[in-house]
Image: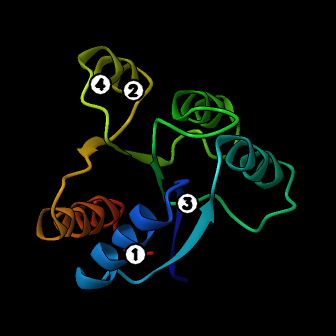
Amino acid sequence: MRRQILVVEDSKADLYLIREAISEAKVDADLHVMQDGQLAIEFLERVNEGVEPSCPDLVLIDLNLPKRNGMEVLRSLRANGICRDALVLIVTSSNAADEREQVKALGSSGYFRKPSTYEEFLKLGPIVRDLLSSLGAP
């Protein structure tokens, strides 16, 4: 069974870069993309209700999202009975120290600040691969 990654990202350009980074790192996973925080929370609720097949192994969350922000998505994930232990990587343009502390307190597995160059963005791929590897065999 392939790894499942939930990507919560509203920027098409950043989503493209995330896909590129994951592909370049040869990560074998299915990506589920939600373009706003509300859709992500609803997806997680459907998983909890058994409507969606399984929890994501890893959730990539942008903090600056429409409808519900990334912090709300993370709080909802941690409150979700079935998926509360999923790994979370914050992928955001924000570099605010208080946000870093808040997401760490909520159990994020890492924080990746979106860089301004393509080459730097590709460094996200090995981080994703390493996080998934920490889970062992799928």
Contact? badges 2 and 4 (CB < 8 Å): yes
Residue tagged by mark 4?
Answer: 100
Q: Position of residue 116 (x, y in %)?
A: 18, 55
Quote the CA–CA distance across marks 2 and 1: 23 Å
Contact? badges 1 and 4 (CB < 8 Å): no
- Left or right side of 48 for 65: left
Residue 6 - label? 3
Residue tagged by mark 2?
Answer: 103
* Residue beneath the point at 34% across and 70% down: 17
Res 126 → quadrant: bottom left
Quote the CA–CA distance across marks 2 and 4: 5 Å
Residue 121 - label? none
Res 125 → quadrant: bottom left
* Residue beneath the point at 23% across and 18% down: 97
* Residue beneath the point at 25% across and 46% down: 112
Amino acid type at circle 4 is: Arg
Quote the CA–CA distance across marks 1 and 4: 24 Å
Q: Earlier in the sequence, mark 2 or mark 1?
A: 1
Label 3 Cα neighbours within 10 Å, binned few <14 / some 14-19 / many ≥20: many
Work out which residue is located at the far top of the displayed protein and give it.
98
* Image quarter (top left, top right, bottom left or bottom right) of the C terminus: bottom left
Amino acid type at circle 3 is: Leu
Residue tagged by mark 1?
Answer: 19
User: Nearest the camera: 98 or 82?
Assistant: 98
* Residue beneath the point at 38% across and 75% down: 137
Amino acid type at circle 1 is: Arg
Q: Earlier in the sequence, mark 2 or mark 3?
A: 3
Q: Earlier in the sequence, mark 1 or mark 4?
A: 1
